[in-house]
Image (spheres, rainbow, N blue to C red):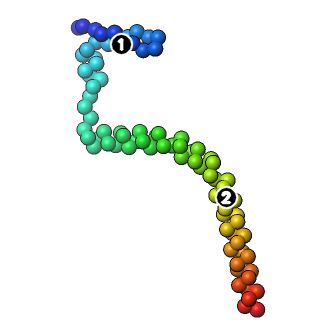
Amino acid sequence: MPTRPTMHARIRVKISRAIQRQALITVPTEQANQLALIHGYQAMAPINREIVRVFTPCEEEAERHLIQFRRQQVALIKKSRR
């Protein structure tokens, strides 16, 4: 079997053409789409974690302000009914 050297940063590996062909397995379109979707979710996970890390304190503060505003409105409504 003829072999062809494959170069990597500092490693030289010889892979036979038969093994190279075996590595090129065709995947049905539906499975390929599922794999692409999984890969996309995995790529988005660190981005989502960073967004949550940045915005969670802002959301908590906004929710505190909203609760405080609602309490003030309820208090004003109760006062006006007296």
Residue 62 rendering spot, x and y as whole percentages: 67, 62
Residue 48 rendering spot, x and y as whole percentages: 54, 46
Q: In this view, does 49 lie to the left or right of 32?
A: right
In the rendered image, the quadrant that contains the N terminus is top left
Q: Residue 60 carries which label?
A: 2
Q: In which quarter of the image is residue 13?
A: top left
Disc 1 element: strand
Q: Looking at this view, is 55 or 41 the one in front?
A: 55
Residue 8 rendering spot, x and y as whole percentages: 42, 14
Q: Looking at this view, is 44 or 15 the one in front?
A: 44
Residue shown at the point (76%, 92%) measured from the top left:
82
Q: Looking at this view, is 7 or 38 the one in front?
A: 7
Residue shown at the point (27%, 25%) measured from the top left:
24
Within 10 Å of disc 2 (Cα), the crowding (few <14, some 14-19, many 20+) is few
Amino acid type of disc 1?
A: Thr
Q: Residue 6 carries which label?
A: 1
Mark before the other along the chain sequence, 1 or 2: 1
Q: In this view, does 1 lie to the left or right of 46?
A: left
Residue shown at the point (41%, 39%) measured from the top left:
39
Amino acid type of disc 2?
A: Glu
Q: In which quarter of the image is residue 78?
A: bottom right
